[in-house]
Image (cartoon, rainbow, N blue to C red):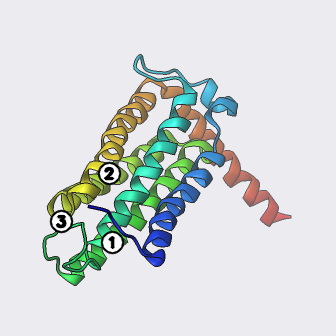
Amino acid sequence: MFIVLDIPVLISFVLSAWMSLIVGSVWSGMGRFDQNKWFKNLKKPKLYPPSWMFGVAWLILYNLMGFAAYFFWRTNVVDQNDTLKELIIINKTTYYVINVLYFIFLFGLAIWNVAFIQSQSLIMSLVIIIIDLILAIILAVFYFIYCKIAFWLFIWTALWLAFATYLNFSLYMINPKTKKLNEKNRRTKKKKTKTLFDI
């Protein structure tokens, strides 16, 4: 049997992947680990992979996430003659909630980069990545229930995030000096703002 896709469906398939890739490009572009002095000075855990591996992994994962989102989106628009017959009837409210959770999840990934590299806060980035991991698990469960294809495409992101959470936690635990430095930086910033207002 041949799978026939009309043009609008094909376009939506490509856009769903590239939308995730755009977020991923912003995510990686905002903080190059290998070019950040603060990150280079951090002590790394034993299981920490080479910096280049993160770019490769996220490039693949953002593609898979986009395709997963597409296949889940298709669960609510396929008809009886469609070749994707692996469907369970899904409530419209649940359908929209899952899609909203996906976009919140993408936003959370971008915010993590800001907290980790731009703000240089290990504790803030740890809190954010834990929330992202929880969202990833929720999405994986929903995908497993309603669209197995989306689940198998997305589960690798959840697994990688679990590993990334371990890395973030390890960095926080073995770099106690960064906590003190962040506190000092915040105090100096507050002092500077006070002096500016005094002037």
Crowd rating for badge 3 (residues with CA inside 10 Å; few <14, some 14–19, many 20+): some
Q: Is residue 82 among what the camera can see? A: yes
**Disc 1 on helix, strand or loop?**
helix
Q: Is residue 72 left or right of residue 33?
A: left
Q: Does 124 sit above or below residue 39?
A: below
Rendered residue at 48%/59% (across/down) = 17
Q: Quadrant of residue 71?
A: bottom left
Q: Give the residue furthest to the bottom.
A: 92
Q: Does 89 sit above or below residue 57?
A: below
Q: Which residue is mark 3?
A: 146
Rendered residue at 67%/54% (across/down) = 190
**Disc 2 on helix, strand or loop?**
helix
Crowd rating for badge 1 (residues with CA inside 10 Å; few <14, some 14–19, many 20+): many
Quadrant occupied by the C terminus: bottom right
- Distance, label 2 to label 3, CA atoms, is 13 Å
In the rendered structure, are the residues bearing label 1 and label 3 in contact, judged by CB atoms less than 8 Å apart? no
Q: Give the residue furthest to the right.
A: 199
- Distance, label 1 to label 3, CA atoms, is 11 Å
Q: Which residue is mark 2?
A: 154
Q: Does 53 sit above or below residue 60?
A: above
| Residue type at tag 2 | Phe
x%, y% of residue 165?
37, 38
Rendered residue at 26%/61% (across/down) = 1
Crowd rating for badge 2 (residues with CA inside 10 Å; few <14, some 14–19, many 20+): many
Q: Nearer the viewer, residue 72 or 142?
A: 72
| Residue type at tag 3 | Tyr
Q: Which residue is mark 1?
A: 73
Q: Earlier in the sequence, mark 2 or mark 3?
A: 3
| Residue type at tag 1 | Trp
x%, y% of residue 122?
49, 39
Q: Is residue 158 left or right of residue 62?
A: left
